[in-house]
Image (spheres, helix red, strand yellow):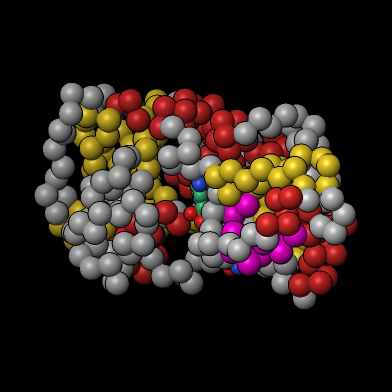
Amino acid sequence: MKAAVVTAFDTPPRYEDIDAPTPAGPADFVIDIVAAGLHPRVRSQADGSRYTSTDELPLIPGIDGVGRGPDRRLRYFVLPDTTRGSMAEQTVVDERRSILLPEEADVIALAAAMNPAMSSWVALRRRIDFRAGQRVLVLGATGNAGRLAIQVARHLGASAVVAAGRDRRRLATLGAVGATATVALDADPDTVAEQLAEGARDVDVVLDYLWGEPAVRAMVALTAPEPRQKPLTWVQIGSVAGRSAAIPSAALRAARLEIVGSGQGSVSTAEILAELPTLAHEISAGRFTVDAKPVRLADVEQAWRTDAYPNQRVVLLP
Ligand SMILES: NC(=O)c1ccc[n+]([C@@H]2O[C@H](COP(=O)([O-])OP(=O)(O)OC[C@H]3O[C@@H](n4cnc5c(N)ncnc54)[C@H](OP(=O)(O)O)[C@@H]3O)[C@@H](O)[C@H]2O)c1
């Protein structure tokens, strides 16, 4: 069968022939893949930088997708850490990690949006005690997951969502998906701090896709200079601006600040799987939108370039 195959961590996958997969466990079956999303996590899996990477090569990247099992019914599936990912004509799926989809489901939208939407959906529904009426700051709102986080937070009842990001052109489009205010992070640090202190100081929850220096600055802006009594829950979800962050001790003393992470590990696989049907339903119904770019799997090498389709979520079609 054809697949995107990684043979070295410093080169993109190539469209090549590879042996067809065979089921191993009792709940396993071979699925014919219809669509698979090229998410940041797929890139980090393919370049060996993912924290769960085993350095095993060759590998087929891909962590989720839509396909048809032996019963020919449409399914969305998530894979465990594996070298036989979803960027192929076929892969092996554990039935318990898949859900049935209606025949009319929008397969491109699902392959594009399930992973980025899950980041905020699971955080708000499973990781913290989020309540309707609370106010949210999305830090790093211009990416696919951040843009979806605005929509998800509003859908789950957030009374206000402040969207912060550095790409002003993208920031200007976020009102249309539910942002009630925006903060441009590319301004000078004092202006950013001022705008965050003014526009986001009363938020209850931060969904943080950035981490690193911008997260530290935002944390200080929201907790200083006056002590903050209102609880603030900071959910660490992505780290596009830095893998670590030097959090000043004062931020934790001067505010009722709680920092938690949300992702694979801090939320159990069972909890994540339990959220799939409702989220798939909402995406298929067009409730949450992502800018998807369908590309033939044969063109994977070209699609892998980060500048090929900026801001769009590539969906590979075998
Ligand atoms: N924990 C989870 O459950 C989970 C699930 C899904 C995704 N994630 C993580 O969430 C993060 C975002 O994912 P995604 O799907 O949204 O990726 P994406 O679509 O590639 O978006 C990333 C965005 O980050 C922006 N960015 C990069 N560096 C920045 C900086 N220093 N300051 C401000 N913005 C910056 C980029 O915008 P510009 O470069 O155009 O400014 C881009 O819009 C990734 O780290 C991903 O691994 C976590």
Tell me which residue sits at (42%, 54%) in the image.
Answer: 41
Judged left or right of residue 68, residue 251 is right
Q: Is residue 253 above or below residue 284?
A: below
Residue 217 falls within the magenta-colored stretch: yes
Residue at the extreme bottom: 188
Q: Position of residue 295 (x, y in %)?
A: 40, 58
Tell me which residue sits at (54%, 26%) in the image.
Answer: 278
User: Which of these two is toward me, 13 or 138?
Assistant: 138
Q: Position of residue 14 (x, y in %)?
A: 25, 65
User: Which of these two is toward me, 56 or 228?
Assistant: 228
Q: Is residue 27 above or below residue 185?
A: above
Q: Position of residue 154 (x, y in %)?
A: 72, 38
Tell me which residue sits at (28%, 67%) in the image.
Answer: 9
User: Which of these two is toward me, 155 or 288?
Assistant: 155
Q: Position of residue 147 (x, y in %)?
A: 64, 51
Residue at the extreme left: 19
Ligand 1 falls in quadrant: bottom right
Q: Which residues are magenta?
A: 208-220
Classified by dominant secondary structure, the portion drawn in magenta counts as helix
Q: Is residue 211 above or below residue 24?
A: below
User: Which of these two is toward me, 119 or 192?
Assistant: 192
Residue 26 falls within the magenta-colored stretch: no
Tell me which residue sits at (85%, 59%) in the image.
Answer: 225
